[in-house]
Structure formats: structure tokens, C-alpha cells
Amino acid sequence: MEITEKNIPGYEKVIFGSDHSAGYHGIIIIHSTALGPAVGGTRLWRYPNNDAALTDGLRLARGMTYKNALVDVPYGGGKSIVMDHGNGTDRAEIFRAHGRLIESLAGKYITAEDVGTSPADMEFVLQETRHVAGLQGRSGDPSPRTARGVFRAMQAAAKYRWGSDDLRGKTVAIQGCGHVGYYLGGELHRAGAKLIVTDVDHERVKRMVTDYGAVSVPLEDIYSTPADIFAPCALGGVINDQTVPKLTAQMVVGAANNQLLEPRHGDLLEGRGILYAPDYAANAGGIINGCCLEMMGWTAEQTAQKLEAIYDTLLKIFDIAEREHIPTYKAADHLAEQRLVGALNTATVR
Ligand SMILES: NC(=O)c1ccc[n+]([C@@H]2O[C@H](COP(=O)([O-])OP(=O)(O)OC[C@H]3O[C@@H](n4cnc5c(N)ncnc54)[C@H](O)[C@@H]3O)[C@@H](O)[C@H]2O)c1
């Protein structure tokens, strides 16, 4: 394994690993270990070039620092990328090589599954390092927990905006009926909400219609169809110059990562009086599941309590935004930064 390191301001460590015999090229990015070992998944993706992979990884690793700080778990933020060269990937070879790169960091970085990787891949990583979570038969599929967290975030937003967290009779437009979208549909259906859904996959839409009485709309209509809440549960960047003017909902609360194409789109939402539940606060259920249940050994009850508390975190964010006259996405960053600075001060005192 050839390992090279690159000094990138604002990041603790960035390493590149290559194992030509395994067909492996990977990057591990540690943004911060101020709160503890950096935790963040491994993404397998086909990028146009190495720079694009690094740019994506840097943004994702920083996001993990903020998400873990906001959730208040003793972990920092990191991410890793395995380059998908699309030429008959031997997953065992590649993920074992990735495990060796992780092992070279001696526990400063802990990985798990992410886009393009599965618990089975993490088993290959485990053959080379113990610094891996998201294993088969452990904390399990995070999607139901992520959906529950998004539901709690919606209740908090409803409480803040409408004075009651009862979602009965409210209409929620869900974009993406995949893992999280489907479980979120179940939570909302049981709470008496009405669902409008869309997905590129018709079978997934059909399941929401059959199981939860959802009304399906064409892909582009999901923004403009009258609804109380818009729930992005498919792709990032869907809150942008084209979509914000179309939105009919009074709030945006969903699971997708990086919903704002650019930070300024959070200001655009604010300008239109649309309440935004910052994505990394609303979708933290998965990380709570992985960190608390699997890595910290909490009981299911303790973990569930932490998950339910997403409600309180969201109310806190809305309160900071109101008091400081700032958009909610900035308020979430401020809350996370307060915890990071607090941890750094404690470390200095010690
Ligand atoms: N799974 C988790 O626990 C978790 C945790 C945190 C964040 N997230 C984020 O939440 C989002 C959903 O995650 P998931 O696990 O449900 O993924 P998924 O792949 O199971 O579901 C995504 C769905 O979106 C659909 N889709 C793709 N393009 C679309 C489009 N243009 N319009 C409408 N639908 C489209 C896909 O067909 C799929 O059904 C992702 O952005 C993910 O990064 C997921």
C-alpha cells in the first residue's frame, strides 16, 4: 500500500492510499477529532477525477464534525472515499485494502457504510481493522431511525410554526420513496398526515400509494403541489434558485444530505418565510443509531431517547435563529460550533 498525505488547511489529516494489485484507490479525510475519533462512512463513487472526489470528501467530512457535535456524541468528523473505476470491482480486495488504510490511522478514524457501500463491504474492512461500524447483525439498517428523527424534526417545526406538534390533517410532500422516505411515510400515516409522493422508481411510489394512501405526482410537481411540509428524501441540492420560488409548503424538513445547493438558498427560504429544519440536524437518527447503539453500547431505550430528543435540538435551533436574527442553517452551525469550542476549551484546561 502506497500512502501519501496532503496538508489541507482546516483539516487534521488527509491521506491517499493506492494498492494497485487490489485495484484500490482511496482517500481518508479527518476533519476534526476535537470531540473524539472521527466517524464517517465510506462512499464508493465514480468521480470524474481525483479532485472532484477530494472536494466531495472534504465537504462531507466537515459535515460529519458538525452533525456529531450537534448530536452531542464523543466523536469527531471524517469521511472516506473509495474510487469506483467501474471495471469489475473485486469488493473483497478493495475493501480489505481500504481496511488497511484505515488501520494505518490507529483508531483516529472509524468508518461505516455510506452511499455505494453495504454492511457486507464493512465485513471485508473488519478483516483488516476493528475501526469499523455498521456491521451485519449489529445496529442494523439506520433508515427507520433516520425516518423517526425526521418525523420528530417535523413535529418540532410544526410546534414552532403552528403552535402544536400534531401533524394530523397536514399534507406532506415527500420527494423520494426509498429507505427513509418509505419509513417516514409510515410515521406520518400513523400520525394522520396526508401524503403526496414522487420518485423516479414507480414501484416505490406504488408501495406508498398502496400502504399509506399517498397521492402520487410527477417528479417536477412535487415542489408546487399544495402541501404544508416539503420533505426532500432523495437527492442533495434540491433547494435552489429554480425550486425555492415554486415551493408552496411552509416548511422544509427531510432526510437528504446537503439539501441547500448553496448556503444562500437557506437565506432564500428564510426570505420567503419558509421554515428550514437544517438537514444534518433532522437526519441525525442514523448516526445516533450507529454511535450510541453500536459504538457506545447504549441500550435500545437510551438510544431511542436520544433519537426522540431531535425534537428538542430543532426547537433550540429555531430559538437561536429567532434570538440572533439569523437563518436556521446558520443557527445549527452556531450550536455545533459552541459544542466544538466547549470541547477544545475543556481539553486545554485538562
Ligand atoms: N438511510 C439513512 O439512514 C440516511 C441517513 C442520513 C441521510 N440520508 C439521506 O437521505 C436520502 C435518502 O436516503 P435513503 O437511504 O432513503 O436512499 P434510497 O436510495 O433508499 O432512496 C432514495 C430514493 O430517491 C429516489 N430518487 C432518486 N432521484 C430522484 C428524483 N430526481 N426525484 C425523486 N426521487 C428520486 C430513488 O429512486 C430512491 O427511491 C439520501 O440523500 C441520503 O443521503 C439517509
Image (tube, rainbow, N blue to C red):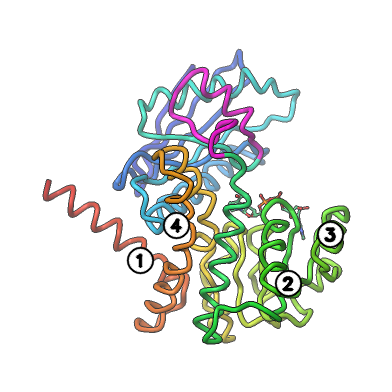
Identify the amino acid type marked 1. Answer: Leu
Residue 153 x/y as whole percent: 54, 68
Q: CA distance from mark 4 to mark 3?
A: 31 Å
Structural crowding at the residue carrying mark 2, measured as other residues with C-alpha within 10 Å and reported as few (<14), some (14–19) or many (≥20): many
Q: Secondary structure at mark 2?
A: strand
Residue 74 x/y as whole percent: 33, 46
Which residue is disc 2 drawn over? 173
Q: Secondary structure at mark 1?
A: helix
Which residue is disc 4 drawn over? 305
Q: Nearer the viewer, residue 40 or 238?
A: 40
Mark sitting earlier along the chain (2/4): 2
Q: Per the image, is 192 magenta? A: no
Q: What's the magenta region?
A: 116-139
Which residue is disc 1 drawn over? 335
**Quick one: which residue is furthest to the left in this view?**
349
Q: Is residue 247 visible?
A: no
Mark sitting earlier along the chain (1/3): 3
Q: Residue at x 46, y 50 (%)?
A: 301
Identify the amino acid type marked 2. Answer: Ala
